[in-house]
Every structure is written in structure tokens, then in C-alpha cells.
Amino acid sequence: MALSLVHDVLDLYSRYNPILYLGLQRARPPVYPYLHQAEFLARTMVRVPVRVFVADEIGLGKTITAISTAKRLSDLGLAKRVLILVPRILVRQWLLELERFGIRATRIERANFQSLSSSGFPEGFYVASMDLVKRERYMDKILGVSWDLLIVDEAHRVGKSSTKKETQRYRFVSRIAVDKSKHILLLSATPHRGDPKDYLSRLMLLDPSLTTDFQRLDNVLFYSATQNVLVFRRTKLDVNNVYEGEKVFPGCSVSAVIVPATRDESEFHRKLISFLRTKILDYHNMSGTEPRALGLLNALIFKRASSSPAAAINTMQVILEKRAYWLQHRVIAEKDLRKRINLAKALLGTGFEEYEEDVDPDKVIEEFAERCSILFSENDVRELQHLVQLAKASMTNDSRLKGVVSLVEQHVSMGDKVILFTEFKDTAHYVFDALVKVLGRENVRLLTSDEATREEELMSIRSWLEENGKRVLVATDVASEGLNLQVANVLINYEPPWSPIKLEQRIGRVWRLGQKKDVNVYTVFLAVDSDKDVLDVLYKKLIAMGRALGKLEKPPVGEEAYVIDFEERREPQPVTLSVKSGSRLKKVSEYTLRRQYIEKGREGFERLVDSIARTIQQLQKDLEKVSGSKRLTREQIMQFMEKTTGFTSSKEAFSYMARLVEAIGKRYPDLVQNKDGKIYVKAPGGALVPLDKAQEAIITLLSNIASRESKAKSAVPIIVSTGERDQEVRIYVVGISFRGGPTLYREPVAISDDGRIFRGKELLEILARAIENKYFDTVDTDVENQVPATDKHMLTLHIQGLARDLANDYERYRSQVAQQNLLREKSPQRLIESLSVEEPRLIGKIFFTSRASRLSEESLSLEEKAEIEAEAMRIAMEHERQQGREPLDVHEREHYDILSQDPVSGEVRYIEVKGHAGPSLIVELTEDEYRFASQNRDRYWIYIVRNIKLGRPELIPIRDPISKIDFRPVGALKFVGVPRGDLYGTS
């Protein structure tokens, strides 16, 4: 009985409380309820529909936030069909994360599309590549499905800029979003790409009632109003300082390491840049036009040479070997080349976002270089041949490779796991082979596009990384996209990324939730002019912007090293680099940067980077508007969480949960055991789950209680415990529903006899005290759900206040946008007016009884005791009649007081009545009564009628008291029920 009340309370928390809904998911591995994720659930808990942009910084668990929200809506019956649209490379990652939550999602792909469409896309979760479903042959059928919830990952790809029309992706999403009843979650770590119209177009998807006048929306007041309503943006620094109040994210330093170059390496890079620059100038002088294809090829050759001599050799040899063939097929080459220019530009831009097909950077370069070979003269061929020889000479004593191998050895020897990133497959193989020679094949794995396409190989790499031992993974960006690599704490960029965004994305793979060690990131520069110019200009001016840059006295390898402290607060940067061109923003790709360096040298390169830096500084000022004028403090977050969940933090919630588990262990050692000072929950089969693993332990305990405790739906568990003072606590379930329909939230709330309300940590503490000091427990099957008027009034005021607190952010937002005249239609019904308060329902009672009340009973005269016993008999007889049973007073001839029978069921009760003037709940039996009770267990009842003299009598029934109360003999003629700790004594 006591445990069934514990189960009911914890079950309510696990299904509705934002912190414990997250924390008590049966996920494998468990999901820790970080406060920023629980806060999101709390702030969206009563919103129907939920239409929000989750824009947290990379590594903060946006996928978990989205899945937990989707599962909550599904559990409530508000999301029966869920469509999740993600980049193609992330489909597998999402399927695995959903499976972690016990959600078996269906992948939409070409092979199964027709069968899914024919069956009408049955209820469930579906994951698809955005660029698959936007295609004409699929779009209409997907849009014809009545989706309840749409989730879009990498949502910064969905928008419409100031210079371009809306994208296909935007059109697709907008056709679902136009239905205001649909739930929509947009996810992106880079919500604002420096273009207000692009950003605002996504917010208009979430709130279609907004004006379409972008200029009116682009202001500080509007952006501030959207915070924690339409847009949730939290950073790692926020999690550490504001939400968790501790270093959840460990330190992260980013070092630029310069390794000295050999004479061959210096000559190769110098002559390569000279050749590329001369080739561009010659072409321009001859034709007077912009050398589009040649410019791209030169930038690609430069990029490959910056990666490794092996990569450079491969590209140059493709040109040399294929030139003769393509000269014979020049017309085809020129026609085919035009098709490949966009792919080559994507490689030197922000990636392959516009392509659905599998795209391999190495193959793109090879095929592009083949077609471009027709642009090289015989003289160029001789120069390329010489450059190949220089590159081969560089390979015999590769300084960068030697430095990287040394760096890896240092960290592996310290027990660190290392991820080494490179952009190209051939460079990955080149580095992998070198590391295998030093560390052994069992300690180094390779992850390129070849391995990533094989599901078994990818899973093998995941498992291998998590095992103990030396671990070094050499990976390319395309292959590892979507992999969470926080099991490693060292990241090495084999070649310097020219994109600050790429660098931050790589860092986010290891510096994310779950990372336990300080993160060390290294970018390795070769001491040649081009690499040093990139370090001095690009890294020091852009990547270190707003962060401290220091020089290391003792570089880990090489001759010089600089370190950037990534923990420092910095305003968000746009996802792409841009420069101001009049009133417009012009994107700057890696191609632009490399071409500028090739054509204009360091001076021209520096001018471009300075212009980008100035633009970023201006954009950051603009983006401050997006972030809102004021960030919430830790105190404000804790106050909000306590008001809405009953707990200030996840840590507090689980500490009180652990307190309750320990209390259960003192009374139920078959469920919870104390071994050598450690608490364990016993799992089915006998395995012990340590309380250190709080989430798993509490889930196990809930399952165990559910399997052993059963009670009638209308039965109310009662716990009687000892306490310093007499107190009655009634526990109710209260809730909020949407327009009287689906339940959005429920929680257990307790009210004491002195009018105090307890919830959250206070309620768990009361339960813990009641369990560990339990005198007896019982269940009242006759109780009707009649809530006292004063209780009902207090509970109604409480839940109405909670509804207002939960709706307040959204109400504020709607009010502010209306005041700013930013709505194109009349504001709909207020959210608070859509919320209904459910009728409270009694789920349990706890009585604390004191030694003082027992002593007070003993002081009564015999006459007073007789009067009280008589009144108790009257009340018990009347109670039986009200329940439809037929009672008979037999106290003068039997060893019990009332024989009661149910004429319908035939149930017979032997009832012993115990009357008390005050709140005492002590039970005494004569020797004959004790013997009779022992012989008639399930049919024997004690009815305690207390508070008779106080004018508010209360009947508490106890079935089979012998099994529930510890009776001890006192003298020769009496048995006394002795509470835990023998507070009453036995005299």
C-alpha cells in the first residue's frame, strides 16, 4: 500500500514533470536531464501547438531536446504521425537516437516510398532526407499526409535570402507550416546566417500570423520578444554558469602548431603558388575574361597541396595522365565541365548542402581536374611534372606528418583518445598508414566515405571508440558528419581549415554534452609562406576574434604554437563569411579566399580578411538584437523551474529521489539493499543496480513496485507513520488540459491539515519520512473521491497559478507583437483561455502520529473512554451501512465488535473498532482479539476512528492488521502495535 502511493507519485513525475520525464526515460544509454533541456520542456509544456526554433550552440543536445519533445507529444496523443527531415548524412544518426528512446522509426527512401504511400503512411515516426522528399515525384504524396509534428534538422538550410527566391526546401516546409495546428520544431546551431530576411523567414514559418514586412520585424523589440518563445538559444557557457552551476563542459583550448618545413617542402609550396598565380595572369591577359573553371581548379590544387603531398600528387597526375584523352574529346570536356563547376564550387564553399546524391570530395576533384586538363599547355605540363617531383621529394621527409605522429603519440601515451580530421580520403589513407606503423593496426581506425556507407563497419567503429585502450580515428568530414565523438578529447586538424565554421563544427563533435575531459584541439601549420599567412591573417583575425590568443612557451611539437581559449564568451557568428557590397551582403567562400591569395598574394588576402572581419563585427552587433537584450540569470532559471516543476535543478530532483530510495531500503530490504555502505536497487533476476546510477536505479524500482503492488482503481493508500507532531497529509493529482480535451500536465500535490501545500522536493521528503518511520499502511477501498471544499479551493488556485506561469512567456510574446502592430491578422484566443483545470483526485493519505497524542489517550478517564468507544461504534456501523453492507453489533459475545456482510458479493468482515479522542493511531489488542485476528487474517479488520473529541471523526480501516503492524506483548493480557523506533515505549 505504501509502495503503491510511492509508485503513483513517481509515475506521475516520470510522465509529466519536465525534469523527471527526461531523466526517467527508459533510454539506453540513459538520458541525463540537463536543465536547459528540461527548461525547454517546461516552457513549451502547455503550448498547443508547439512551434519553436531550437537554436542551441553545437554540442548542447538539440536532437535529445527534439526527440523528448516529440515523444511527450506522442505520449499525450498529440502527435500520432511525426515527420523528421534531416540532411541525408544524418538520417542514420537520427534513427539510432530514436531507437535509443525506444522509438522504432521508419526511414523513407526510394525503395519503400511506394509501399508507404499505398498504405497511407500509418501512424508512427518517419525519418527522411529533406532533399528526397522535396522532389516533385515525392513531394505531393508526402504533403498529402496529415502530419501532426514536423521536425527539421539543420534548419538554417530552410529559408529565403534577400538576394534569392525561396528555396525548394522552404516551399516544402511552408506548405506544412501554413496549417497553424501543426507542431513544428526547427533545429540549428547557426540560426542566423547574417541575412535578417533569411532568419525572419524561418520565424514566420513558426508564427504565420506575423506581418510579411521584413523591415518591420527586423528590430530589437521583436527579437527580444521571441526569446524563450519562438527561439531558444543557449551556449556552452550558459549551461556551465547559468543552468548547471558547474563545469558540465570541460575546458577547451585550440592550438595552432607550426612545424618547420624542409627545403623541399618550402620550394614545392613556393613554386606551386608561383605557377598557379602565373597561370591565372596569363589566362586573363590572353582572353581578358574571368578564368572561372581555371580559377576553381587552381584553388582546388592549392587546397590539395595544403592537405598533403600525396593529395597534391594525385591531383596533378590526374591532369597529366588524362590531358591527352580530353584534348581529343574537347567538345565533350567543355560541355561536361560546365556541369561540374557547381560541385567544385560547393567543395570550396559551405559544403554539399544542395546535393541529394552521394558526393565524394576526392571524386569531385578527380573528375573536375580531368576535364580541366585541356586548359593546360605543354609548358604547363612540364611545370606540373616538376612540381610532382618536388612533392614526391617532400613525402620522403614529411614535416607535417612527423609532427602529427609525434603529437598523437604524446596524447595516446597519456590515455587520451584522438580524432584526426582531414578533408580528403587520400590524405586520410596517407596519415592512417603512417600511424599504423607506429601504433599498430588494432589502435588506429579509418573512417572515410567508403567505411561510412557500410552500416556494420560504422557500428564497429562506434563500439571500438568506446572501448578502453589506445584509440586514434582518422576521419574525413563527409564521413563523420553526424557522429558524436565525445569519447575522444583530442582533435587534430591535419590541414588548416579555411572556414571558421568548419573548425567550430569539428570542435563541436568532441566538445559536447558527455565530454568528461578537457578538450585539446590542434591545427597543424607547415612553416611555408602560404600556411604562415593563413595563420597570421585568417586565424589570428577571424578565428580568434573576440577570444584571448596566447603564445605557448613550450609547443607540444614544432617550433611555435599559439592557443585560443574557446571557453570565453563570444557573440555568435553568422554561418557564412560575408563582406559588405553597398547595402548588400556578399558571401565569401573558401574559393574566394584561396583565389584572392593566389592572385593577390598576402597583401590582397589580408585586405579581404580585414573586410570580412569588419563585416562580422557589424553583423555581431545586428545579431545581438536576435539574442535578446537581456539573458536570464541562474537565479531566474532556478526560480522558474521551482515554480513549474517543484525542483530547482535536475541534481536536486535526483538527490530527493535518492533520499526516497534510501528510505524504502530501510523498510523493504527485498527491494533496496545496503551493502558495505552503498545503496543498491534489486533488479528482476537478482542483479543489483547501484544508486550511483540514479536514473537506472529509480526506473528499476518503479518496475519492481508495479509488478508487486496492485490495488483497486478507486482504492486510496494510507500510510501511518510516527512523527514529532500529529499531522495529516492528503495527496492529490491535479492537472491542466487543453480546451477540456487532452491532458497536458499533471502532478502530485499534498495538502496538510494546517493548510500548507507540498510539491516537488518537499513532497518527496514527506514520502521518505513516512516510509522510513512507517507504523503501518493500509488501503481504503470505500473512499469516494470527495475532495474537501477547502482542499479543492487551494488546489484550484495552485494549478491556475501554475498554468499562468507556464503560459506567461507566450502571452507576453503575443502581447508585445500586437503592441508593435506586427500581426497581419487578429490575435487568436489567448493561450491561458485555452487551458482547463482538471478536477483534483485523491491518491493517498499520510498520517503522522506522535507520542504526545498517545499519552493524551492514556490520560482519559474510564468514563471518557467508554463514551468514545460508543461513538466509534456508532460511526463504524453507519459507515458499513453507507457502503451497502449489513452490520451487526456482536461486541458483547465475540472477540470483535461488528460482523458485517455484503449482500451482493457475500464478503464477510470481522471488525474490531478502536476509538480515539484525538489524532492518535495507536492499536492495542487483547490476547483473545490478537488470537482471533491471527486466525482470520483477510476477513479481520480494525477500524480506527480518531479525532472523536475534536468533532471531526475520521475512520481508517486496516485489513489483516497482523501482517501490517508489529504487535508486541505487553504484560500477560495485551498486545500493542509498536511503531518503528519504539517511540511509544511498551509500558
Image (cartoon, helix red, strand yellow):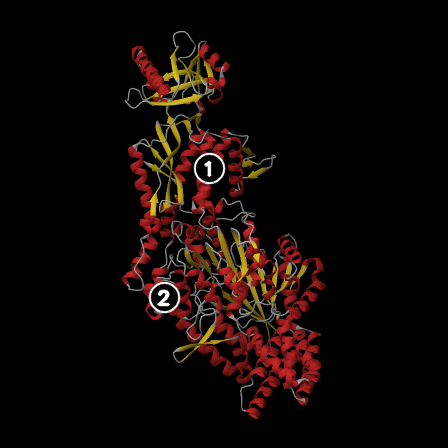
For mark 1, give the secondary structure. Answer: helix
Residue farthest to the bottom?
Answer: 286
To which residue does mark 1 refer? 659
The image shows a total of numbered marks equal to: 2
Q: Position of residue 595 (x, y in %)?
A: 54, 81
Amino acid type shown at disc 2: Lys
Relative height, residue 125 to residue 781 (above, below) = below
Q: Secondary structure at mark 2?
A: helix
* Quadrant in the picture for residue 13: top left
Measured along the vertical axis of the image, is residue 73 above or below residue 334?
Answer: above
Say few, some or many: other residues with alpha carbon within 10 Å of mark 2 (under 14 / 14 to 19 / 20 or more): some
Can residue 859 be spotted in the picture?
Answer: no
Q: Which of labels 1 and 2 is toward the front?
A: 2
Q: Residue at x 57, y 73 (%)?
A: 347
> Which percent across, then down, holds residue 963?
49, 21
Quote the CA–CA distance across marks 1 and 2: 45 Å
* Residue type, mark 1 in image: Arg
Q: Is residue 291 visible?
A: yes
Which of 496/506 is in front? Answer: 506
As drawn, the residue found furthest toward the front would be: 118
Q: Give me the disc on residue 625.
A: 2
Disc with the residue nearer the chain's start (1 vs 2): 2
Image quadrant of residue 910? top left
Q: Residues within 10 Å of mark 1 (few under 14, many from 20)?
A: some
Q: Position of residue 826 (x, y in %)?
A: 30, 60
Report the front residue among 968 and 91: 91
The answer to whether marks 1 and 2 mark residues whose Cβ atoms lie closer than 8 Å is no
**Quadrant that contains the C terminus:** top left
What residue is at 32 percent from the left and 38 percent from the top?
A: 795
Side of 829 relative to 696 (left or right): left
